[in-house]
Image: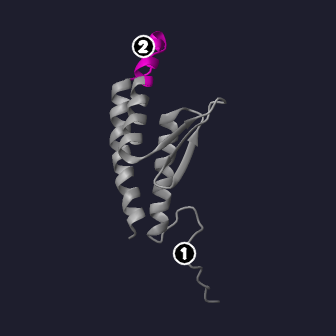
Amino acid sequence: MTLWIETLERLVTLLDEKLAVAKAETGEFRQADYSAWRAGHDRAEAKLIEFFTNEEGARFNPRPAGEHSVTMAGLRASSTSGTTGALTNWRTAARKKIAAEDGFNPHGSGPMPIERRDEP
């Protein structure tokens, strides 16, 4: 296992924890109290940005067209649903890289050799 894969595994675990905390802080969406929910959501995203920027060297780029992106540990992911969506997509991309490194690629391509079948 490479140091990069170990870093991705550590970041995926950390991201799972931080996203769960952010979701708990934001609370459940309530249409009747949208402004309060939105304010909580924005505070939770700001904490995520601050933590991952300061502690893990992540770079966040909101775009005027609504696309948000994050680059961390050499992987970039984006989302049109905000910073939380970009981090969730980053986590998915990291998990795919980790799985591919283990020799198993659930998406059907990658480092697995193709074996010839014996003819009947």
Q: Is residue 120 visible from the viewing direction of this image?
A: no
**Residue 50 image position (x, y, % from top left):** 39, 35
Image-quadrant location for residue 113: bottom right
**Residue 6 image position (x, y, % from top left):** 36, 62
Nearest the viewer among 2 and 33 is: 2
Identify the residue at image location x=67%, y=30%.
65
Q: Amino acid at mark 1?
A: Met
For the stretch drawn in magenta, what is the main secondary structure?
A: helix
Identify the residue at image location x=59%, y=66%.
108
**Residue 61 image position (x, y, % from top left):** 56, 37
Alpha carbons under labels 1 and 2: distance apart: 49 Å
Q: Is residue 92 visible from the viewing direction of this image?
A: yes
- Mark 1 Cα-neighbour bin, 10 Å: few <14, some 14–19, many ≥20: few
Identify the residue at image location x=62%, y=33%.
63
Nearest the viewer among 61 and 90 is: 61
Quarter placement of the C terminus: bottom right
User: Hey, which residue is sitting farthest top in the picture?
Assistant: 32
Nearest the viewer among 86 and 60 is: 60
In the image, residue 70 above or below residue 37: below
Residue 82 lies in the magenta-colored region: no
Q: Secondary structure at mark 2?
A: helix
Q: Which residues are magenta?
A: 28-42
- Mark 2 Cα-neighbour bin, 10 Å: few <14, some 14–19, many ≥20: some
Q: Nearer the viewer, mark 1 or mark 2?
A: 2
- Residue holding disc 2: 36
> Can you tell which mark lies on residue 21?
none
Colour setting: one colour
Residue 39 lies in the magenta-colored region: yes
Q: Amino acid at mark 2?
A: Ala
- Residue holding disc 1: 112
